[in-house]
Image (cartoon, rainbow, N blue to C red):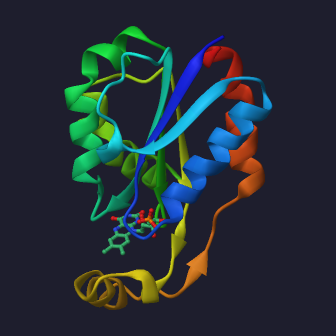
Amino acid sequence: MSKVLVAYASKAGSTGEVAQAIAQELCAQGLTVDVRRVREVKDVSEYDAFVVGSAIRMGSWLGEAKQFVEVNAAALQAAPTAFFTVHMLNTDDSEESKTNRAAYVAPIHAIVQPDAEAFFAGKMELGKLSFLDRMISKMMGAQDEDKRDWEAIKRWADQLTPQLA
Ligand SMILES: Cc1cc2nc3c(=O)[nH]c(=O)nc-3n(C[C@H](O)[C@H](O)[C@H](O)COP(=O)(O)O)c2cc1C
């Protein structure tokens, strides 16, 4: 049976909760799954498939997530690999949003092309941010808001299962 690693980078926690929801659904579909922060993963050799995700900060994946993809590029390239991205802006179906979403992940695709990919609306909780992040968020007019669509996240994990198995 396939063993899947769901590895994620999160600053304020919402991407971690999305990663947990994906892992839970893959488990429910019969896969063996570990869910870990990217920085906790030392060795990927025991895994047959990968789901890697990051929050977006200032238009980019978190540095530790990009580094994980760089360090493990050969393993990710050789196995079924899916990426997910959690963010607050550019969530609609307009061409502008699609272009901006593609720009979020272009530097990651330059390292590894995923077999599947999803973008999920995330959560903003000002009280969970560092002082600097809170300042930036307030300047951008951000307010507390949870836009995560758990059904969409579950659906994606469901339809991903055959690709990872
Ligand atoms: C300082 C800061 C910068 C952000 N920059 C972006 C951005 O450029 N584009 C975007 O769509 N979302 C942006 N977001 C929203 C986050 O991606 C979103 O809140 C996400 O759910 C955070 O994930 P986390 O809770 O795992 O850290 C930003 C949030 C913060 C606090």
Residue 158: x percent and y percent? 75, 32
Q: In this view of the protein, can residue 14 be seen by the observer? A: yes
Residue in the image at 73% along x and 56% along y: 150
Between 11 and 117, the residue placed more toward the observer is: 11
Vertical arrangement, residue 123 with respect to residue 20, above or below: below
**Point 37% across, 66% down: residue:** 11
For the residue pair 136 and 44, the one nearer the viewer reads as 44
The picture places residue 18, in percent across and down from the top left corner, at 59, 53
Q: Position of residue 112 (x, y in %)?
A: 31, 23
Q: Quadrant of the N terminus?
A: top right
* Residue beneath the point at 65% across and 14% down: 165
Picture quadrant of residue 139: bottom left
User: Which of these two is toward me, 79 or 148?
Assistant: 79
The quarter of the picture showing ligand 1: bottom left
- The answer to whether 154 is drawn above or below residue 135 in the figure is above
- Number of numbered markers: 0
Q: Position of residue 119 (x, y in %)?
A: 53, 47
One can see residue 91 in this view? no
Horizontal side, residue 116 vs residue 107: left or right: right
The residue at 70%/16% (across/down) is 162
